[in-house]
Image (spheres, rainbow, N blue to C red):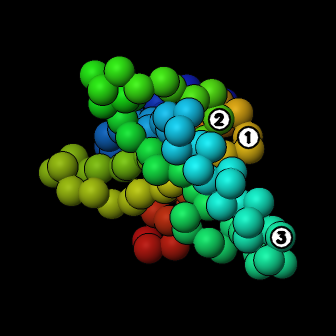
């Protein structure tokens, strides 16, 4: 089942689906990559260090701030709500600062995690 079919199936089940993407600026990715190299040199597992993931912002904030949008790093969030508008499940996907940001991949991962969360709580 592709992403569109999965969203349609959730909507047919009475849930609303909202997927949002946040991106990184070039400066934030550079800082995160520097931190990652420093942690790696210190033989520390870098993915466990929160500061090694760059800060993310909604794209409109980056554009309004005249900052340069990076093609690497980001965050995708999927929120499922019931008919009453209550949040029933949330899923997130983080893109490391060394990986190119691909909206589709992030959407699939975040939505999959939200659906898994929904099944665990049901």
In the image, what residue occupies the spot 29% across and 50% down? 81
Vertical placement of 21 versus 42: above or below? above
Compare marks 3 and 1 and give the one earlier in the sequence. Answer: 3
| Residue for point 39% across, 59% down | 89
User: Along the horizontal axis of the image, is 48 left or right of 23?
Assistant: right
Callout 2 secondary element: strand
Q: Secondary structure at mark 3?
A: helix
83 and 99: which one is in front? 99
Q: Position of residue 49 (x, y in %)?
A: 62, 72
Residue labelled with disc 1: 99
Towards the viewer: 18 or 14: 18
Q: Which residue is mark 3?
A: 41
Q: Can you see residue 109? A: no
Residue occupying image coordinates x 66% and y 74%: 48
Residue 21 versus residue 86 in the image, above or below: above
Where is residue 117 shown, x and y percent of the image?
50, 65
Going from the N terminus, do you reach mark 2 or mark 1 first?
2
Q: Which mark is residue 72?
A: 2
Q: Are marks 2 and 1 in contact (CB under 8 Å)?
A: yes
């Amino acid at each position: 089942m592709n992403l569109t079919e999965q969203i349609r199936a959730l909507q047919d089940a009475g849930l609303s689906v909202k997927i949002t993407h946040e991106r990184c600026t070039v400066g934030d990715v550079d800082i995160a990559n520097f931190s990652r190299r420093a942690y790696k040199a210190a033989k520390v597992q870098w993915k466990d260090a929160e500061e090694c993931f760059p800060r993310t912002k909604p794209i409109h904030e980056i554009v309004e701030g005249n900052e340069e949008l990076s093609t690497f790093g980001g965050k995708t969030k999927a929120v499922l709500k019931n008919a009453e508008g209550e949040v029933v499940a949330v899923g997130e996907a983080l893109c490391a600062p060394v990986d190119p940001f691909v909206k589709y991949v992030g959407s699939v991962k975040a939505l999959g995690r939200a659906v898994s969360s929904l099944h665990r709580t049901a």
